[in-house]
Image (cartoon, helix red, strand yellow):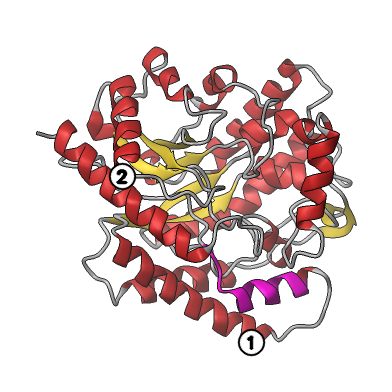
């Protein structure tokens, strides 16, 4: 995993806007309506190529496939895992429960929206969970590699995402295994297929683990913090087992409090969960420092320094607002993070979260997304002039 040896390298968190027609196909399929599988496959491949082109154009150094061939950052697994069936609705967030007026407004804004829901009618584990076969993830990696051939010198490095066992276990309720630990371990064994396939194709593996923060105000909103931290420790242990065959410097871990424009005043502070997150045997962390609730928490890394071989991808672009951050704002944020980390070579510029973590769910217009990423790259250049004189 590259460090920013001569300048601040620019990356992002993974999910990028899907074409409207593709997002609609995913949304219809998620509702059980008939769709043309061949059309989804064709449109997905085209979207990957376009997404790679755009990243190269705006100056991303460490790019990915934009998750274009998936309907969401974890629900795509319903097509790849056995043992899933039935349905249930995820609990609401504690911060949404706390503000009835906001909840009504939020529901009105989302009513009738064509999107793949991350909360309603989710599958459950009703049988043994196994990865069916590796052909789909292999083709996904091959399609990305093919798209990269047109830009042989555009990217310093590339990555692909896969979800944490913890977010899958939380969102796809267990009705088969005797214990939570057994369910997590089964998911870890299944997801190892994707983790290792991504690494085998030469991409950095990014594990998306919002569960390590998000579940505090969802699954564990009415329970003590200690219960949540125990869950988080179990998840990290399973992740470490699942990535045991991948070099530490080829894995980065993304943690966030949920990609929603909501109050977030029930979020667990990073200070409380960082000791658990730091137990992950990974080469870097991807964390949000642009959103108004967590923008100050980069300071945690002054008190709890990174290991010598680790990097920090600092979210300095908000993925939930159509404001295009000024490059000087981006540069200032990066300089503050670098000061807290104590070494600018271990800081990379990134976004708080994905821009379209579930098809149709994105709040930022596509043309604004690319403007924000261009500003991210320009802000990183400004910061580099000051940090690498």
Mark 1 lies on residue: 38
Is residue 27 in the magenta section?
yes
Q: Residue at x 43, y 24 (%)?
A: 298
Quadrant of image for the C terminus: top left
- Residue 1 is left or right of residue 213, and the answer is left
Residue nearest the viewer, comparing 90 with 236: 90
Q: Earlier in the sequence, mark 1 or mark 2?
A: 1
Q: Residues within 10 Å of mark 2 (few under 14, many from 20)?
A: many
- The structure residue drawn at horizontal position 54% and vertical position 48%, both measured from the top left corner, is 321
Q: Residues within 10 Å of mark 1 (few under 14, many from 20)?
A: few
Name the spot of residue 72 as percent of width and height, x first: 64, 60
Image quarter hosting the N terminus: top left
Which circle marks residue 66 in the picture?
Answer: none
Q: Write down the region rendered in magenta.
A: 17-29
Verify whether residue 64 appears in magenta.
no
- Residue drawn at x 37%, y 76% is 146
For disc 2, the marked residue is 327
User: How far apart, in angstroms, are the residues tagged by discs 1 and 2?
Assistant: 42 Å
Asked whether, in this view, residue 351 is left or right of residue 272, the answer is left
Vertical comparison of 233 with 238: above or below: above
Relative depth, front residue between 51 and 40: 51
Q: Secondary structure at mark 2?
A: helix
């Amino acid at each position: 995993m590259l460090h920013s040896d001569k300048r601040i390298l620019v990356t992002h968190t993974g999910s990028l806007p899907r074409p409207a027609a593709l997002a609609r196909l995913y949304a219809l399929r998620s509702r059980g309506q008939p769709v043309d599988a061949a059309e989804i496959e064709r449109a997905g491949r085209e979207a990957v190529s376009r997404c790679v082109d755009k990243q190269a154009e705006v100056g991303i150094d460490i790019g990915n496939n934009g998750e274009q061939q998936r309907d969401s950052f974890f629900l795509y697994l319903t097509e790849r895992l056995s043992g899933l069936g039935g349905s249930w609705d995820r609990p609401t967030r504690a911060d949404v429960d706390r503000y009835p007026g906001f909840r009504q407004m939020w529901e009105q804004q989302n009513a009738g929206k064509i999107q793949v829901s991350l909360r309603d009618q989710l599958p459950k584990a009703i049988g043994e969970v196994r990865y069916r076969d590796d052909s789909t993830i292999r083709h996904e990696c091959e399609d990305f590699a093919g798209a990269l051939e047109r830009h042989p010198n555009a990217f310093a490095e590339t990555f692909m995402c896969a979800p944490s066992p913890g977010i899958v276990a939380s969102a796809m309720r267990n009705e088969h295994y005797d214990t939570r630990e057994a369910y997590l371990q089964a998911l870890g064994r299944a997801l190892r297929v994707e983790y290792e396939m991504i690494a085998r194709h030469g991409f950095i593996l990014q594990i998306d683990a919002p569960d390590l923060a998000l579940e505090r105000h969802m699954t564990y909103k009415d329970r003590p913090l200690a219960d949540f931290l125990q869950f988080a420790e179990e998840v990290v242990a399973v992740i470490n087992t699942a990535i045991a065959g991948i070099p530490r410097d080829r894995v980065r871990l993304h943690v966030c409090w949920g990609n929603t424009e909501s109050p977030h005043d029930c979020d667990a502070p990073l200070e409380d969960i960082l000791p658990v997150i730091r137990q992950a045997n990974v080469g870097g962390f991807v964390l949000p420092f642009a959103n108004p609730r967590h923008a100050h928490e980069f300071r945690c890394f002054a008190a709890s320094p990174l290991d010598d071989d680790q990097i920090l991808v600092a979210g300095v672009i908000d993925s939930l607002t159509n404001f295009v951050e000024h490059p000087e704002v981006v540069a200032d944020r990066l300089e503050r993070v670098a000061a807290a980390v104590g070494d600018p070579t271990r800081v990379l510029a990134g976004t708080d979260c994905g821009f379209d973590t579930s098809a149709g769910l994105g709040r930022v217009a596509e043309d604004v997304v690319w403007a924000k990423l261009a500003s991210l790259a320009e802000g990183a250049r400004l910061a580099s002039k000051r940090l690498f004189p």
